[in-house]
Structure formats: structure tokens, C-alpha cells
Image (tube, grey):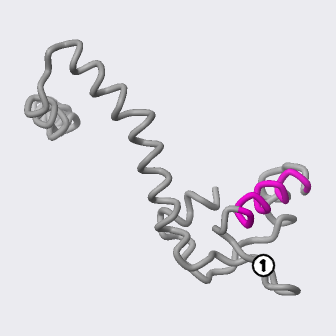
């Protein structure tokens, strides 16, 4: 959740994050479990502790998380997609064209036309 909030911009750099007790209470989990997650983020350099004040988002943490997530995205989605495309004989140009399509546009037009016809 903290990582998502940092990536989404809801938690900016140098912003204080909720305490482990607040996380635990909000999510109904054991405070030790919340502390493990927060401490992992501290170990990764995403958060840092200010003694007696709390935890804060480290400078550069969004860029670090974005880099990790892009690499994960590549490994989990792009590599398998490219592999399947090769099996199907889809070249890079055709694959790029497929990726550029807006899959929801046709559905929205169909729904709008159906509403107009119903009126």
C-alpha cells in the first residue's frame, strides 16, 4: 500500500507515513506484521526513520520504485507477450499496432448507440 501510494504520488518524498500501529489498526492486522512491511521498506531505502518522530518517504524513492516496477512489468508481461507474439508470427510492427488500440473505445460507442436507440 505504501509503495502504491508513493508511485501514485499520494505520498510525496519527505512525507510522513502512518505509524505501524495505525496501519495495523486500519487493516486489522498484527502490529508486528505491519512493522515487518515498514522495516522492509526502510531496509530498501524507500522509507527512513526520524527518531521520535516517525517514518518518512526517502528522496528518490518514487524513481526507485518506478524502476523496479518497470523491470517487473517487463519480466511478467512483456517477455511472455513477445514470446507468444513470435509463436504466432506477429512482428514488432503488428504487435505495436495491437498495443496502440484502445480496447474500450468500441465498447463505449456501442453502449452510447444502444442508449440512443433505447430513447
The residue identified by callout 1 is 49
Q: Which of 8 and 79 is in front in this view?
A: 79
Whether residue 76 is visible to the viewer of this picture, yes or no, is yes
Residue range of the region highlighted in magenta in the rendering? 32-43
Secondary structure of residue under mark 1: strand
Q: Residue at x 82, y 56 (%)?
A: 34
Q: Residue at x 8, y 33 (%)?
A: 93
Q: How crowded is mark 1: few (under 14 residues within 10 Å), some or many (20 or more)?
A: some
Q: Is residue 78 above or below residue 89?
A: below
Residue 79 image position (x, y, % from top left): 35, 31
Occupied quadrant, residue 26? bottom right
Q: Residue at x 72, y 76 (%)?
A: 48
Q: Which of 38 and 10 is in front in this view?
A: 38
Is 47 in the magenta?
A: no
Q: In this view, does 73 lie above or below 36?
A: above
Could you tell me what secondary structure mostly forms the magenta stretch? helix
Q: In this view, does 15 lie above or below 6?
A: below
- The quadrant the N terminus occupies is bottom right
Q: Which residue is drawn at 45% across and 57% down?
A: 67
Residue 46 image position (x, y, % from top left): 64, 68
Residue 38 image position (x, y, % from top left): 76, 61
Occupied quadrant, residue 44? bottom right
Amino acid at each position: 500500500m505504501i509503495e502504491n501510494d508513493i508511485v501514485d504520488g499520494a505520498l510525496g518524498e519527505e512525507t510522513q507515513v502512518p505509524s505501524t500501529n495505525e496501519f495495523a489498526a486500519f487493516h486489522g492486522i498484527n502490529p508486528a506484521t505491519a512493522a515487518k512491511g515498514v522495516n522492509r521498506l526502510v531496509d530498501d531505502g524507500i522509507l527512513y526513520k526520524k527518531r521520535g518522530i516517525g517514518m518518512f518517504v526517502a528522496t528518490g524513492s518514487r524513481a526507485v520504485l518506478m524502476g523496479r516496477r518497470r523491470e517487473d512489468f517487463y519480466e511478467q508481461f512483456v517477455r511472455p507477450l513477445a514470446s507468444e507474439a513470435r509463436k504466432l508470427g506477429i512482428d514488432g510492427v503488428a504487435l505495436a499496432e495491437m498495443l496502440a488500440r484502445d480496447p474500450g473505445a468500441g465498447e463505449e460507442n456501442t453502449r452510447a448507440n444502444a442508449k440512443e436507440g433505447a430513447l
